[in-house]
Amino acid sequence: MSAPAAEITVRDARRLALARAGILKPDWTGLPRAASGRGVRARRALHALIERFGYLQLDTISIAGARTHALVPLSRWPGIDRNLPEELLQPGEPIFEYWGHEASWIPIDLYPAFGFRRKEYRSGRTWHSKGIREHPEVAKAILRRVEAEGPMRSLDLTGPMLGEMWRSKRERWVAYSLWSTGELAIRSRRNFQRTFDLPERVIPERWRREDWTLEEGVRALILRALEGHGWATIGTLADTWRLKNVRPQIRAALEDLTSAGKATPCDAIAAGGKRRPGWVRPADLELAARLRRVRPAPDRGVLLSPFDPVLWRRPRVAHLFGFDQILEIFKPASQRRYGYYCMPVLAGDRLVARYDLKAHRKRGRLEVLALHYEADGAKPPAADRAAAESGLARFAEAVELAVD
């Protein structure tokens, strides 16, 4: 008979999530203290953040003044050079780019864990390998060229435009397929443009020596997801890595981690007594207990990217914060409730507002298209207003723009 699950309140789980995400004070997060500029300390801070989550999601949208892979670290260390995250992937860095949560930068030690995914894509049953299936001769030609001539920029890949929703030049599309199957790797990025190369020139041999089995990979990824989230449901753990059709392996991984003392079942209990089953690391249960004494400053606002690891899973945000995290990028303007690229405002351990922002880089200005408070009534609480104002000021300084 299994032991009863541990218990944690939703409030404790919320604060634990913020601590593990690196948003509370460094005393509680275990991440580096203040980092600024683009030197060694700033790079180490970025590496530590990627190590904590297991990934840093990449995205092209820069309407708010920077892309999400810059916004996430800037919300933790606003003094970091906003351009550094754009250039972080370089030869010798302890990260690689692959399909993790989405296209992401991932700690290099997790490269073997994605062997099952590269194998799945090589099997030819997914859209990730469609470019190779439909254009095998182009794929062979690209591999021969990279082997003979060296790294190849995505800008140099030409050919006719293909695709419907996601249009791309043929050679570029095929190169993406070769990257997905592991036959190419991303050597570097600059101005959001990839440079492709052979894996043996990018991934250290110790990590390419062998791919882990599906079971080994899932176990490593589930543990890394727990390290980033604190408390989490099985659904959140699976969705962290977009794990599909492997629920038995996930449950087996959690059983193994429990036997090894690295995870434990834990129910999150809401104010009304409703329980939600999940999992947590024993060390994080202890951290959650210590965090009960913490009183985050409610008027020190922090603007978060909509793709921040704290926010991307809508049911989790609703459960922990009572906040409806809506992403309206793909909605027509007339159907949007809050705006195109809304950035929630964190005040203490509450999400109190959301900004829709638009950067005008050439003019050096940051335009506030909309500000919506969560509090009911015509006049939001003074603390919420103070958080929104201070958060906006800190954000504008971090992306080097002046607020209109």
Image (cartoon, helix red, strand yellow):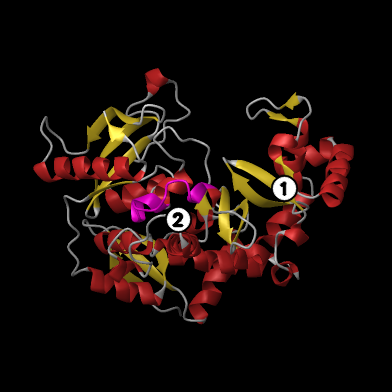
Give me the residue at 15% from left, 35% from top.
Answer: 376
Give me the residue at 26% from left, 28% from top.
Answer: 404
Q: Is residue 309 left or right of residue 108?
A: left
Q: Position of residue 248 (x, y in %)?
A: 60, 63
Q: Position of residue 51 (x, y in %)?
A: 50, 64
Which label's residue is closer to the chain start, 1 or 2? 2
For disc 1, the marked residue is: 196
Q: Quadrant of residue 116?
A: bottom right
For disc 2, the marked residue is: 38
Q: Amino acid at mark 1?
A: Phe
311 w.r.t. 206: above or below: above
Q: Quadrant of residue 335?
A: top left
Q: Is residue 201 left or right of residue 84?
A: right
Residue 63 falls inside the magenta stretch: no
Q: Residues within 10 Å of mark 2 (few under 14, many from 20)?
A: some
Residue in front for this viewpoint, 30 or 398: 398
Q: Position of residue 228 (x, y in %)?
A: 44, 62
Residue with the most extreme top position: 334
Would residue 313 be seen by someone viewing this image from the given angle? no
